[in-house]
Amino acid sequence: MIFGATGGVGEALARHIHAAGKNLVITGRDEAALTSLANETGARQIAGDVTREDDLQRIVNEASGDDGVAGLAFCVGSIDLKPLRRTKAQDFADAFHLNAVSAALAVQHAAPALKKAKGSVVLFSSIAVEQGFTNHAIVSAAKGAVEGLGRALAADLAPDVRVNIVAPSLMDTKMAAPITQSEAMAQGIAKLHPIPRLGSPVDAASLAAFLLSDQSGWMTGQVLRVDGGRSHLRTKG
Ligand SMILES: NC(=O)c1ccc[n+]([C@@H]2O[C@H](COP(=O)([O-])OP(=O)(O)OC[C@H]3O[C@@H](n4cnc5c(N)ncnc54)[C@H](OP(=O)(O)O)[C@@H]3O)[C@@H](O)[C@H]2O)c1
């Protein structure tokens, strides 16, 4: 079950899961984009807004079959970058709601179905939790909450359900478009990574697919950084 399946990572993950021959449920707000991906992957589509709890409940109810839910990836998120002096309380509240509260409620509603299938959950954080960047106060606060949430959920749901968190650096998706649409800026940021390129959605989706699969069956409560080495290495200066 993929939330945010019409986004860069969600779509790459949907293709990966489809190629592995699994049943797939895809969700997002954009019906046309969902239909296009459903036609390609044979997935079942359920539209809804994750910030509305009635939508979340309906999506989870419709997606949970008799066998439960074997995997849930919450690929929804936001990146609201602005100087600290221009941030408003509402910016923090909106980012917290979309990234952390909606993820928490999605897992809460899906917990019985996840337990039934001994499922696995993947949430998405950001490199901006491990490392501080200018203009990132809103997203860093929200994604820091996601990392804490993921560990707490992993404890709450053990041993039946595993919960892990993927923390990417900048990837070439529509979310990053305001930053990457300048070729000069994209190249400049790419060079800051010890592996000197921007991430692709497949980089994060491959890791998520591994965490959803039985191959990671003894991993839970972990934050895994897929970031070209940027959060932990310095290769220049
Ligand atoms: N891209 C990056 O550089 C980057 C870096 C660090 C972390 N991340 C995190 O990685 C994850 C995947 O990011 P991405 O780059 O694939 O993002 P993306 O391309 O912008 O996709 C985001 C997805 O979330 C969905 N979405 C947004 N708001 C929603 C809402 N209220 N209700 C339902 N669906 C909603 C969007 O669907 P619709 O808008 O079509 O409804 C879309 O499918 C996110 O958690 C993001 O924060 C991304």
Image: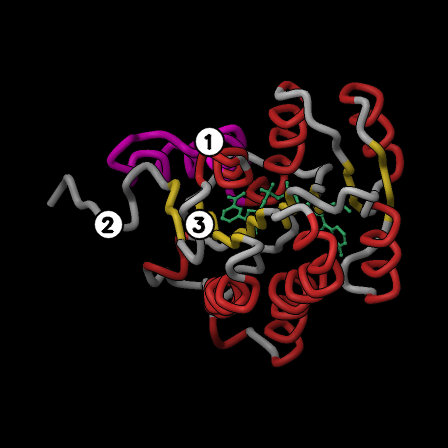
| Crowdedness near tag 3: few (<14), some (14–19) or many (≥20) residues, C-alpha within 10 Å | many
Per the model, the C-alpha gap separating discs 3 and 2 is 12 Å
Q: Which residue position holds label 3?
A: 167
Residue 99, numbered label? none
Residue 232, numbered label? 2
Q: What range is drawn magenta here?
A: 179-207
Queried on whether the Cβ of the residue with tag 3 lies below 8 angstroms from ligand 1, the answer reads yes
Dot 1 falls on a residue whose secondary structure is: helix
- Left or right of 157? Residue 40 is right
Q: Can you say which quadrant of the picture contains the N terminus?
A: top right
Residue 209: x %, y % from top left: 54, 34
| Crowdedness near tag 1: few (<14), some (14–19) or many (≥20) residues, C-alpha within 10 Å | some
Give the mark, 2 or 1, whose residue is nearer the N terminus.
1
Q: Nearer the viewer, residue 93 or 63?
A: 63
In which quadrant of the rendered view does residue 170 lie? top left
Identify residue type, mark 3: Ala
Q: Can you say which quadrant of the picture contains the C terminus?
A: top left
* Color encoding of the figure: secondary structure
Taking the magenta stretch, the answer to whether it contains residue 200 is yes
Which residue is located at x 47 percent, y 73 percent? 84
Report whether residue 139 is seen. no
Q: Which residue position holds label 1?
A: 203
